Amino acid sequence: MTQSSNLARFVNQTAMQLPIWTTAGRPATPTVGMMGYNSTLTRAEWYNGTTWLAFSTGSSYSVQALIVGGGGGGAGGGGGAGGVLTGNLTLSVGTTYPVVVGAAGTAGNSNSGGTAGNGGDSSFNTTYIGYGGGGANWDNQNGIAGGSGGGGGASSSGNKTAGAATQTSISPLTGYGNASGTVPGSSNPYPSAGGGGAGAVGGTPSANATTSGSGGAGIANPISGSTVGQNSGGTYYVAGGGGGGRSSTSNGGSGGLGGGGAAGTAGTTNTGGGGGGCNPSGTGYIGGSGVVVLAVPTSSYSGTYTGTATVTTSGSNTLITWTSGSGSYTA
């Protein structure tokens, strides 16, 4: 950038023209009060000593958030989907908000006491938490609680209870999570329960059924223009539950719409889908990792974030999608 392009200049002695830069081409060592026009963000901005702010930005602005916890792993039953929080939040200009994306729950084993792991929690600003889905349990065990509950494995010792959903609403965001299915006391072929999804409970098979419970369905991604989730007819769904496991004499349950794994299949990455239940050898499958998405008005977007994230635009919004680990956004 030349010296002349760094300087404001008067045009026809009637107006002042600001220097023009891109987000990547902002001054490397800005000083307080420096100002210019950002052609990437199509706005005038100034530096307050900490971050670049739009001239039109007040002390706060509203964003839309989607926070999905990691899906629980599968074992005998299907893994529970990660809990979901979504809605609008008000951010304070200049404040840095931490972001965490929940990891996938580990797989278990239906034969050897191998309970699957719960998914990791996803969060924004530490307060707003999408709880990790419940890992599925092995045979003759109850379901396990999580954002959405994980299913129990096949039972020859009487009915087994559902894994409860722990996801709640955290004002002003709305929470979504559901329990797993229950496990009937059965004889051969011993069906198991499906994991809960953000939009529906996991499937409960009837006693002695030949097919295990399906995973509960997830919910539609509410953020316009976001392609996070499982695409079905042009709508993207997140946080489906995992299908209950199969054995040599029973069929596995289907995965819930929203990245839930069918029996013998892992949950889909960055959907919070529950892992599918076991294959005939007894081995379950991992859940799908979580995700955090912010829809920020482009007129207010600071361009300052950290972590593993992608940035796209949709209409008048800039979408930031974090897909793993931890990071932050500075409003």
Image: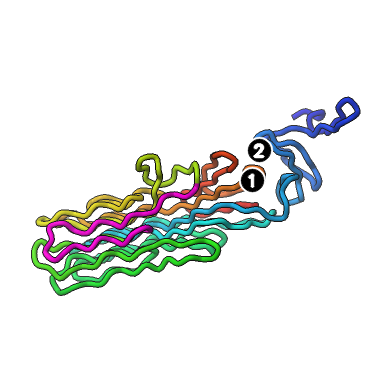
Do the residues bearing badges 1 and 2 touch, measured as CB atoms within 8 Å?
Answer: yes
Location of residue 156 with respect to 283 vertically, above or below: below
Location of residue 68 with respect to 3 vertically, above or below: below
Among the two numbered marks 1 and 2 on one chain, the one whose residue lies closer to the N terminus: 2
Please tell me which residue is depicted at 52% across the width and 56% down the height of the picture: 87
Please tell me whether the stretch drawn in magenta is mainly helix, strand or loop. loop
Dividing the picture into quadrants, the one containing residue 299 is: top right
Q: Nearer the viewer, residue 29 or 59?
A: 59
**Residue most toward the bottom?**
158
Residue position for label 2:
41
The three-letter code of the residue at mark 1 reads Tyr
Residue position for label 1:
301
Location of residue 6 in the rendering, given as x and y in whole percent from the top left corner: 79, 33
Location of residue 14 in the rendering, given as x and y in whole percent from the top left corner: 89, 30
The three-letter code of the residue at mark 2 reads Leu
Residues shaded magenta:
197-223
Location of residue 227 in the rendering, given as x and y in whole percent from the top left corner: 44, 42
Q: Is residue 222 magenta?
A: yes
User: Going by the image, does 265 lie left or right of 304?
Assistant: left
Distance from disc 1 to disc 2, alpha carbons, whole Å, reads 8 Å
Q: Quadrant of the N terminus?
A: top right
Q: Is residue 231 magenta?
A: no
At label 1, counting other C-alpha atoms closer than 10 Å, the crowd grade (few under 14, some 14-19, many 20 or more) is many
At label 2, counting other C-alpha atoms closer than 10 Å, the crowd grade (few under 14, some 14-19, many 20 or more) is some
Dividing the picture into quadrants, the one containing residue 194 is: bottom left
